[in-house]
Image (cartoon, rainbow, N blue to C red):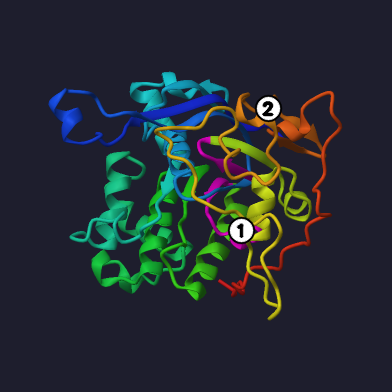
Amino acid sequence: MTALLEVRDLKVRYRGRGGGLGDWLRRRPPPWVHAVNGVDLDIAAGEIVGLVGESGCGKSSLGRALLRLTPASGGSVRFDGRDLLALEGEALMQFRRRAQMVFQDPLASLNPRRTVFETLAEVLRVHRLCPEAEIRARVLELMDRVGLPASLADRSSRSLSGGQCQRVGIARALAMGADFIVADEPVSALDVSIQAQILNLLVRLQRERNLTILFISHDLGVIRYLCRRVVVMYLGRVVEEGPVEAVFARPRHPYTQSLIDAIPRMAPDARLGASALTGEPPSPQARPAGCAFHPRCPRVMPQCRTGEPPPPWMADGRRVWCHLYAEPAAPADRRAGEPSAPQQSSIEMASD
């Protein structure tokens, strides 16, 4: 498939918090936070890609940088063959019509003083997407497409449930005619039953409109249900990517193995896997030398402490950035045997 989005060596950094009164008196600037530290990523048109990792690994910073909501510090991003980071003026406006974000907190992403109709109509007016006389009909059409009754059109967002607010957010993205959506943990703030409805809505809309979706989540069960390909991040870098079923059945990177082992099992006597993580991730303000995962890695080697991960090992449609797979050594397998396939998420995907 043709790549709609091509990311090469993308970096995002910003100033963190200061070190205290002493730094303020000496006028020392706060240290840099390296939120995204050299990411390569391709997303094909019509594909749903899952992006996973612990809190603070840079998932949201990466998603926002892909939409020009956060400035990139280096690297390149090409969208539909065009240099995204160089777009300005009308060209940038055209990109924003095609690329939209669905935010994590559905209530905070909407203006509580505006009605559903006003929220969606504003998008149509600002971007001149339809004549004034047709706006009401267009808004009601968008609401119907995301499963909202017309009776909610004149209600403010603060009188809606979280699931209804998220549907308004999705309708707002569709109003622009977007074909690329970054969904930043769009169901994490919702009840489990509502999560299933929103996920099924996204699946249906993707099929109907051939949407391309980058779905950011920390819930591996949701990723396995929704996505065809998964990208695993740790402290600003991608450590493994590949087809969902292949990665879940046979994770290669020790960090991915640890995430899979940590998925709760339904059996009463089930225990955490042998690779369960211990400790906390290092601060992005003070990344350790070498591979950033080495302080927590159960298979750490001397070269992991000093050298950056080698170019990715590639096989079976996946890429792995790890010293265990450096040439000329043969690909290393899991020491304790193959991981058991994780059970399906406890979320039962209800019909939309």
**Residue in the image at 60% along x and 36% along y:** 238
Q: Position of residue 311 (x, y in %)?
A: 70, 24
Left or right of 122: which side holds 332? right
**Local SS, label 2:** helix
Query: Compared with residue 176, is residue 94 higher up or lower down, i.e. above or below?
Result: above
Q: Is residue 298 left or right of residue 83?
A: right
Residue 161 counted in the magenta span: no
Number of residues whose C-alpha sits closer than 10 Å to that of mark 1, classed few (under 14), some (14–19) or many (20 or more): many
Quarter of the picture containing the N terminus is: top right
Residue at (71% x, 58% y) in the render? 274
Q: Where is residue 143 in the image (x, y as percent from the top left)?
A: 40, 63
- The extreme left residue here reads 25
Structural distance between the alpha carbons of marks 1 and 2? 30 Å
* Amino acid type of the residue that numbered disc 1 sits on in the rendered structure: Leu
Residue in the foreground of this view, choosing between 108 and 127: 108
Q: Can residue 44 be seen in this view?
A: no
Q: Mark 2 = which residue?
A: 303
Judge the density around disc 2: few (<14), some (14-19), many (≥20) Cα neighbours within 10 Å: some
Residues 40 and 165: in front is 40
Asked if the stretch drawn in magenta spans residue 228, the answer is yes
Along the viewing direction, whichever of 78 and 273 lies nearer the viewer: 273
Residue occupying the point 62% across, 62% down: 221
The answer to whether residue 327 is visible is yes
The image position of residue 60, as x and y in percent, is 44, 43
Magenta part of the chain: 211-236
Residue in the picture at 71% in, 51% down: 244
Residue 220: image tag:
1
Query: Considering the image in quadrants, where does the C terminus appear?
Result: bottom right
